[in-house]
Image (tube, rainbow, N blue to C red):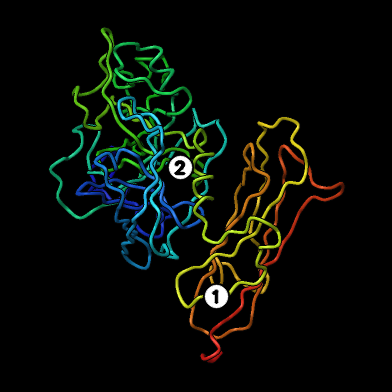
Amino acid sequence: MVSTVTAYTDLRNRAVAGMGFDGVVRVSVSGFYGSGILLYDGAAVLTAAHLFSHGSTSANVMFETTTGTQTVTSGQVSVMPDYEAVNNNHDLALVWLSGSAPLTAERYELYRANNEIGQTLTLVGYGVPGTGATGDLESYSGAPLRQWANNRFDVDAADLKQILGASMGWYPAADSQLVADFDNGTTTRDALGRLMNVSDTGLGQHEGLITSGDSGGPAFLDGKVAGVASYSASLSTARAHPDIDDQVNSSYGEISAWQRVSYYQQWIDQSLRAQYPNAPTAASQVQKQVLEDDSGTSLAYFLLQFNGVRANPLDWISVRYATRNGTALAGQDYLAISGTVVMYPGESQVAIPVEIMGDRYAEPDEFFYLDVTDPVGAEFAVGVVRLTAVRTIIDDDTGWPF
């Protein structure tokens, strides 16, 4: 759950099904649990590496959507190779689903800009309940509850370390962790105002902070995943003691940190791409017609290729992409996608997957489009503002009537 201003029995912070948070999941690992986020390809959940610190490589992922509760198992986990527990650095992991995610669960794009500081975030998770005035309720034994709240990214964790020195006992990697504090509207409990002179007394009734069990849960900006919940702390100096009770329990005056997704987007993107099943690696391998399955989802691929020369080999190249209906309709025949795809140094092509929705109803073959626009770091041919490709969904339900 999330520690909020009011008690969890107040429904204002309940992240019920249908609110846009149904891709925020509960991740159970070897008797422990945290939270996670279903990513844009529908095949993997992004969460915190420290959930797997006991050595487990499997997990159960619980989805709570408008069609009910569903648990999908996983037997494969990718932890960031340079995860560093003592300093809370690179605290990210990907959990690969063994089956299709629910169609009603949102898939989330990454927040790729590095302008997060100063912006209001939405945090969501399944951690234990609590309030700013009393801290979290570690004795809570009720059903899992998904909560949401707002906060504001105030500072980079490495900048906080530079100010506090030895009074902060870990060393965050520069630019990799985003920090917010839990304010109650007073300067006394404004932790980062007192510790760093970054004054902000909070968002009133909407304010919240992560608790135990929210690890791996998302911080959203503009509906995209900007941060992954990592840890909380109670910090003080000889002159400033902002925590209301000097305990690490998600109470007023504490801080929380999220791993910065924009900093780690290359690892996330390339890890996902490496696991795409049967993805084309050459134009000759692209299947322009795809069979519809009877249930769940299958993948249709588009292959984006860069045929030019980078001005600098280390440059990133990006484009915007979005699906568009033809006779196939988003939400009925395929899952709509849109976002930014990046070609990192050394890459000259990227496969873009689209999930095709399976059913048992006979229908005509149908088609949809993928549009590519807004290149950065490269250019389309003169006069071209949009590239478009089409895929046809071949119906295989001939034994069923229209």
Q: Nearer the viewer, mark 2 or mark 1?
A: 1
In the rendering, at what x and y percent does residue 272 appear?
50, 49
Q: Quadrant of residue 143?
A: bottom left
Quadrant, the C terminus: bottom right
Residue type at mark 2: give it.
Phe
Above or below, comparing residue 93 to residue 390 in the picture = above
Mark sitting on residue 220: 2
Q: Quadrant of residue 75?
A: bottom left
Residue at 22% across / 49% down in the picture? 30
Q: Residues within 10 Å of mark 1 (few under 14, many from 20)?
A: many
| Residue 23 relative to residue 255: left or right | right
Above or below, comparing residue 112 to residue 391 in the picture = above
Circles 2, 1 touching at the beta carbon (< 8 Å): no
Q: Quadrant of residue 159?
A: top left
Mark sitting on residue 12: none
In the rendering, at what x and y percent does residue 370 appear?
67, 60
In this figure, which residue is indicated by the disc labeled 1? 292
| Residue 91 relative to residue 131: left or right | right
Residue at 72% across / 62% down in the picture? 389
Residue at 39% across / 23% down in the picture? 172
Quadrant, the N terminus: top left
Residue type at mark 1: give it.
Glu
Work out whether residue 4 or residue 366 is closer to the camera in this orientation and state it.
Answer: 366
Q: Residues within 10 Å of mark 2 (few under 14, many from 20)?
A: many
Report helix, strand or loop for mark 2: strand
In the rendering, at what x and y percent does residue 206 appear?
36, 39
Above or below, comparing residue 93 to residue 389 in the picture = above
In the rendering, at what x and y percent does residue 3 appear?
27, 38
Report helix, strand or loop for mark 1: loop
